[in-house]
Image (spheres, grey):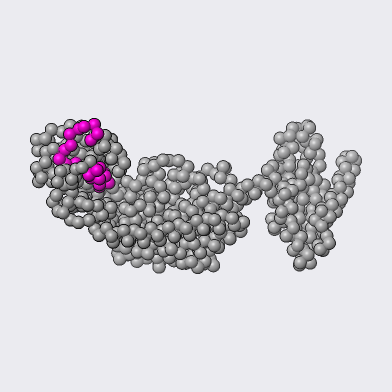
Amino acid sequence: MLHKFSEGKPYNVIALCLTRFKSYDQVRLIKELCKRCDKTGIKVIVFASVTDLYNGGINDIGEAQIFSSFEPERFDAVVVLSETFKNSEVLGKLISKSKRADVPVISIDREIEGCINIEFDYSNAFEQLVRHIVEYHHVSDVMMIAGNKDNSFSEERVECFKEVLEANGIAFDRKLVLHGDFWADPTRAALEKYINDGNHIPKAFVCANDIMAIECMRTLKEHGYRIPEDILVTGFDGIDLEQYYSPRLTTAEYRIEDLVDSIIDAVSDNIDGRRDMETRIVNYINRLGGSCGCKMTKAENVEERLYKEKFITDDREEFIQFMYNMIAQLSNYPELHYIFRMIPEHIGRIGYEELWMCFNNDFLDENMDVNIEFNRNNQSNAGYTSIMKVPLHLKGIEICKNGNGEYEQSDLIPDIEKVIEYTDSIIVVPIHLQGISVGYMAASFKPEKFFFAYYQTFLLDFRHILEVYVNRSTTERLYVTDVLTGIYNRHGFYRNIGEVMRRSQKTGNPFTVISMDMDGLKSINDTYGHAEGDYALKKIGELMRKATNKGEICARFGGDEFLIAFCGENASKRAEEIVNDIKGEIEYFNAFGNKPYYLNISIGIYTKIAEKTDTLDGYIRNADDLMYEDKKENKKKENKL
């Protein structure tokens, strides 16, 4: 049974799960929560996806796997930004898994049965905004710009609008409601159509969010209307962009500090076996601005904003150029471990403290390169393997020596409990190839120093590099691999054997070539069909792979011809071991393989210290000659039988 990360420790550890981690609201929450938790003895591990999982395509399938990467029972609580999940199935699985582990789940912005819910008081705040227009400003000629039709948040605000109108003796009609779908372009389109159709223009527009309110004001101004002299406008949400528009919006917003306080209170009230399921309410606060004429607050210093934005944009463009250079440079590297080695040169600006690249055990081989057996077409996307490999671990831009370790996936990263001792915040994001999970990336960070946008940019660009590398490796593998047996073909043999022969010349260790020929293949094909002939050849290849487990090169040279080659101090003894292993396996197959035919091979072994005048073809020819002699002897034995 897994123990909690906090067991016996003076702190608690929570998981924070959300989508679209780079977006403004999510970054604001992560930063504030991590800062406040640092002061209250709570460690935060963030599990985040790039997308909101709405489309459900192959990319979203890979993104969603990050929420299956952790074991809830290791945490004191799981906090979920439920409204950011646009795939209810993924959200449901995440919450159900946490409940089964008897871990308190705190759901933010969506009421979910069995969770400690933190909700925003949207309706009361929106009602007060409508009342402000109708009752304080005495405007009865008012319309609303709502979000998407049938959207629950939008319909809740439409209902508030309706109730306030009717309470003040104003008849409500659905024609008083335009739909801007919570975005700028649909808002402009709806309002332009309304105006161009010659409809009556009201004295006020109440909008369901700030984006629509700002676009409403822009559109009205372009048609010659003054805000607020001719038309009053209100928004809702208190977005950052609103500060820089004139006139400032009358809107409503929540304090991020209030939300974080509610989260920390909910965590504190539901750990160590305690349960307080009471719903927490975060209030929206109405903020009067110039768009209704109440408080003609000036827009924030636009020149200062432009300067900051120019600085940020220039820095971002420079970082993106760094990423382009990284893609161009690393995409052409011949081996994956070279790519890992060069990554630190390009990512210092992200602002992480430590970074781990963690991969499925079946994705990387012992040399930390893509496993030759990996084939995305045959992957079921079962998530992450129980054992993970870390080919790259960075502290700043320094590569740690313990980078190439293996560890239990339930630990998330190697030595997690030691890391948590000195780290307060970690963010974990998925690495996948067209939806097939191959691993994840984790980074510890200080909220004030970490650039979430850069982290995402690097993640996406690294995925691209990995995709190119895997595609190239797959193509090269097809070129050098015998499709039937999975061992090298003639091209692969010649591509790799030169270095082995040179090693013999340099070290003085003998160089060995074993030539093998399968006997009776034509008879199997003619009698039992080519499928059985293929099976027999595959079996030979399988037995060769099994016997050559010390770096030897084996290949199907063509038809029923096979070669094994290697260099070593005790080459003759090793050759004997290999041949005996293969012959022993063949005997076992013939006895218990349940086939109507026998496997038989003829073998020739040629061993000699390679000299500069020697040629590989000469070694192969000598081994072949010995193999044909063995074949003649086998024929004689067969004829006697």
Q: Is residue 516 above or below residue 323?
A: above
- Percent position (x, y) of residue 382? 50, 45
Q: Nearer the viewer, residue 584 or 130?
A: 130
Direction from residue 503 to residue 263 in the image, left or right = left
User: For the point 72% across and 49% down, which residue is it?
Assistant: 491
Q: Is 210 one of the magenta-colored residues?
A: yes
- How many labels, in total? 0
Q: Is residue 478 above or below residue 262?
A: above
User: For the point 46% across and 44% down, which residue is it?
Assistant: 59
Single out the residue that lies furthest toward the front.
224
What stretch of residues is rendered in magenta? 195-222
Q: Is 66 one of the magenta-colored residues?
A: no
| Residue 376, image quadrant | top right
User: For the point 47% across and 42% down, which residue is it?
Assistant: 58
- Percent position (x, y) of residue 520? 81, 39
Q: Nearer the viewer, residue 39 or 501?
A: 501
| Residue 1, image quadrant | bottom left
Residue 312 appears in the picture as rendered: yes
- Percent position (x, y) of residue 498? 74, 58
- Percent position (x, y) of residue 631? 86, 46
Q: Nearer the viewer, residue 127 or 107?
A: 127
User: From the image, which quarter does the C terminus lie in?
Assistant: top right
